[in-house]
Amino acid sequence: MRADDPLVLGFQVAGSTAVPRQRAPRRLDAVKRQVSVPAEVWQRLEAVASQLGTTPNDLLVRFANSGMAQAERLGKTRQVAEARWAAFNAAESPRDGGSSVPSIDELVAAAEAYGSDE
Amino acid sequence: MIALDTTPAAKIAPNSLGYQRAVEAHAAGDPYAITSAVLTELLFGMERKRGDAGWDNQRQFLHSLIDAGVLTVLPFDDRAAAVAARLRAIRRVPSGNTSAKAAQRSKADSRVAWVMDLHTAATVFVSGAILASDDAHHATIASDLDSFTGGEAHTVVSAPF
């Protein structure tokens, strides 16, 4: 394992290097809940936990934390995107100009001008 | 979400600082993004060198980063098209040379570069992301984007590498 190996869920990860199992951190502010975990997910948790030197329970909590942080970040980004889009549209002033539209020639010429500064 | 402009994105190569940062950002659950316009520019440079092993390797490396989610690609969608169209309508191609590279460009090349920058800025704007760029064009475009949102868009920061 090298100092510049990436950190994943707070663990330094270097390929499939096995790490001796350590005691999982004691979380003083924790609440105990019973959770049904699909057998296949639990098996994968056990396999990865043994590589990282922790317990499946600890890994499950770290995945939950990481997943929630990511979901919150995506939610914030989406909020910013929607606020920008709303502001962009609000800048447009609606007009009561009847139902007339430009001619086809005018429409085509206007669209083709995108690549020109004339 | 940080979206890399073309120059920093082009610096992501095997064993580079850019690659290291991209892997770190991905591991932290907040991967770097690039716009589809930036991806076009990156791939264009590589396509012109198709058949050269080094450039072919770099093209495959770039695709592998995207496939693995280390780099996210932001699409140029209907909202981005609407924003790009308004940006294009309110400002002509800047006439002043913003860099030594820009000074060497023909008028036509400058227009293409400007339009690609508009597409990137619009894509980043509607994605809720922040563009990491040291390109003077983007500071100009950011001021136009700010005018859409009352000065709150904050769409550009310096490139991280």
Image (spheres, coloured by chain):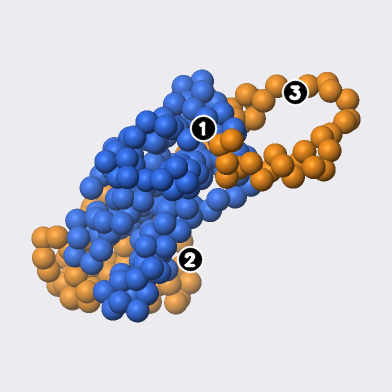
> Which residue is drawn at the image coordinates 36% and 51% (left, top)?
B6
* Figure disc tally: 3
The x and y percentages for residue B158 are 29, 38
Whether residue A62 appears in this view of the structure is no
The x and y percentages for residue A46 are 32, 73
**As shown in the figure, which amino acid type bears the numbered disc 1?**
Arg
Tag 1, which chain? Answer: B
Q: Which of marks 2 and 1 is in front?
A: 1
**As shown in the figure, which amino acid type bears the numbered disc 2?**
Ser
Q: In this view, does A115 lie to the left or right of B156?
A: right
The first of marks 3 and 2 along the sequence is: 2
Residue position for label 2 = A36
Q: What element carries label 2?
A: loop
Chain A: give its colour: orange
Q: Say yes or no: labels 3 and 2 on the same chain.
A: yes
Query: Mark 1 and mark 2 in contact (Cβ < 8 Å)?
Result: no
Q: Which of marks 1 and 3 is in front?
A: 1
Judging depth in this view, the residue of B153 and A2 nearest the camera is: B153
**As shown in the figure, which amino acid type bears the numbered disc 3?**
Pro
Residue position for label 3 = A94
Q: Is mark 3 on a helix, strand or loop?
A: loop
> Which residue is drawn at the image coordinates 74% and 45% (left, top)?
A108
> Which residue is drawn at the image coordinates 22% and 76% (left, top)?
A16
Q: Say yes or no: labels 1 and 3 on the same chain.
A: no
Chain B: give its colour: blue
